[in-house]
Image (tube, grey):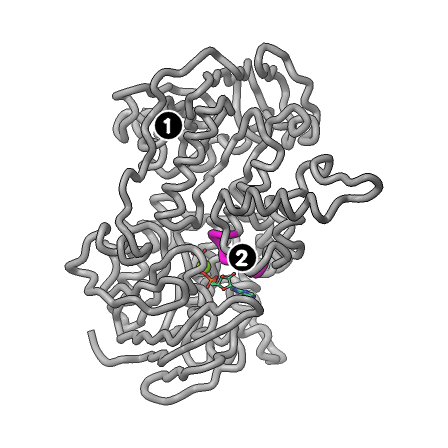
Amino acid sequence: MGEVILEAKNISKTFPGVKALTNVSITLKKGEVHSIVGENGAGKSTLMKIISGIYSIDEGTLEIAGKKVDLKSVNDAFNNGIAIVHQELVNCQNVTVMENIYMHKISSGKSFMNWRELNKQAAEELKKFNLNISPSTTMSKLSVSEQQIVEIVKALSVNAKVIILDEPTASLTETETENLFKIIADLKQRGVGVLYISHRMEEICSISDRITILRDGEYIDTLDGSCVDKVTIVNKMIGRELVDYYPKKSSGPGEVMFEVKNFSHEKYFKNISFDLRKNEIHGFFGLVGCGRSELAKSICGIDSKVSGDVVLNGETLKIKEYADSVENGIVYLTEDRKTEGLFLEMSVKQNVSALFLDNIRGKFFLSNVKESAQAEKYCSRMKTKCSSLNQKCMNLSGGNQQKVLIAKALSINPKLIILDEPTKGIDVGAKSEIYNMLRELAEQGVGVIVISSDMSEVIGLCDRVSIIHEGQMVGEARDEEINEKFILHRASGI
Ligand SMILES: Nc1ncnc2c1ncn2[C@@H]1O[C@H](COP(=O)(O)OP(=O)(O)OP(=O)(O)O)[C@@H](O)[C@H]1O
Ligand SMILES: [Mg+2]
C-alpha cells in the first residue's frame, strides 16, 4: 500500500441546527480500503459528500495527491478521479441503465455518441457483476439491489482513483455482496483507494485495511484493520460497552392471536398458512425474491391476492386496501423507506402522523400540538436524531429515516406489526434497542412479525421462524432448530 492519494484535514460542517462534522481528518492511501464507521447520524455520509463535491466545506481542506482542491460539484470530483455510490440511490429512475452508467459522458455535451457501442460496453460491465439485465432497461424497472449494482458499475466506469461506497451492501444479497468484494479486491490491485461505509461489523473487519471511527461528528480513532475485533470497534463507536445485544426469547407463547389461511397470489406465492401466538416474535426467512414481502403486502391489502383469509383475535377481517388493514390495527413497515415508506419532502412529525390522522384531529382542523406531541413520544422512544421535529425527512441520516418509519408504524398503536427488513441501515447500538423494543411490544401483547434476510437477526431475535422458498412455505423452525444450517437448507429448497 502506497502513498496518500486523498487527505481531508480538519473538516467541519454545520447544517441548520446540527453540527454534522467537527474538525475531522482522514487520509486514504493508494490501494487501501479505509472504512468509516459510526452510529446513525455520526457524520459519515456528510464527510463522503464533502469528499465527492456535493457539500461545500465550512472549515478545513481537501487535498488530492498532495494538491489542495476546491470541489464545486460531483462532476468536479469525477474529473479529479473521485466517484461516489450513495447510500440512498439518487439515479434517475426514467433513464435506461446504459444512460445512467454513462451519464457523465452523455452530459458532457459531445454531439456524437455511439449508442450501440455504449450499450455493448454497458452490457459487458454488467456481466462482470453477473447482472442479467439489458442495458436498455429503464432504471425504475430494476429492484433496489439491481439499481445499487448499476450505481457501482457507473462509479467504476469513470476509472476513478478514489471510490466511495456508502452502505453498498445494505440492499444486496449474499452472492451480490461476495461479487462486490471481489470487485473491491480487484480495485485494490489496480491501486484504487476505497472509502467504505457499512453497519455490518463482519464486513468491516474482513475487508478493511484501516478503520476510522466517528462519533457525533467528531473523529475518535483510526485502527489497523488486520488486528482489530468487532467489540473494540463497536465500543469505540457508541462510547460504551454493548451488553445483551439480543433480548431474552419468549418465556412461553400464549394463544393464537393471528392467522393467515390459504393465501395465494397469481405470481408470487401459493397456499400459505401460518399463525402467530401472543408474546412471540415470528420471523420469516427466505432468499430474496421468494415472495416474503409480497405475502406481507397482500395480507395488508397493499397487493392483491387470489384467495385467503386473515383472522385477528378470532375475527375474520375484510381487508381490501391498506386503509382497512390500518383501521384493524395491522401495520406494515416497508423495506423500501425511500419510495414506499416516507414523504421525504415532509417533516418528521408529518411523517409520524401520516398513517392515521384521527390521532391528531382537533376541533375543526388537524392539531399541530397533538401532532408534535405524538411525534415527540414515538421519536424519543426510537431515539431518533433530528435537529427538530420540523426537519424534513430527506435531511435525516439514513438510519434516522428508518427510525421515523418505525415511529410512524407505532403511532397507530398497532395490534399487529409486520416489519420488512426493519434494521436496514441501523447502527449496531440502535439495532439492539430496536430488538428490545420489539420484545417489549410482544410482551405487551402486540403481534410482531419480522421479515429479514439477516440470518443472525432471525436467529437472535425470533421465537419461531417460517421459511419460504419460491412462494411456498417449506418449513418452520423452533427452539434449537433456529440455526443457520436448518434454516438455510430449507430456504434454498434443499
Ligand atoms: N442536507 C442536510 N440538511 C440538514 N441536516 C443534515 C443534512 N445532511 C445531514 N444532516 C444531518 O447531519 C448529521 C449527520 O448525518 P449523516 O447523514 O452524515 O450521518 P451518517 O453517519 O451517514 O448516518 P447513517 O448511518 O444513519 O447513514 C445528522 O444529524 C443529519 O440529520
Ligand atoms: Mg449515512
What's the mark number on residue 462? 1
Quarter of the picture holding the C terminus: top left
| Residue nearer the viewer, 174 or 317 | 317
Q: Which residues are magenta?
A: 394-400
- Residue 445: image location, x then y, percent: 49, 22
Q: Residue at x 44, y 67 (%)?
A: 84
Q: Is mark 2 within 8 Å of ligand 1?
A: yes
Q: Is residue 200 above or below residue 190?
A: above
Residue 104 inside the magenta-drawn segment? no
| Residue nearer the viewer, 478 or 185 | 478
- Residue 297: image location, x then y, percent: 58, 31
The reply to whether dot 1 and dot 2 touch (C-beta < 8 Å) is: no
- Secondary structure that dominates the magenta span: helix
Residue 6 position by quadrant: bottom left
Crowding at dot 1, Cα within 10 Å, few <14 / some 14-19 / many 20+, comes out as many
The amino acid pointed to by label 1 is Cys
Closer to the chain start, of discs 1 and 2, is: 2
- The residue positioned farthest toward the bottom in the image shown: 67
The amino acid pointed to by label 2 is Cys
State whether residue 124 appears in this view. Answer: no
| Residue nearer the viewer, 414 or 140 | 414
What's the mark number on residue 122? none
Q: Residue at x 31, y 72 (%)?
A: 192
Residue 397 inside the magenta-drawn segment? yes
- Residue 442: image location, x then y, percent: 45, 26
Q: Is residue 85 above or below residue 269?
A: below
- Residue 97: image location, x then y, percent: 54, 58
What's the mark number on residue 386? 2
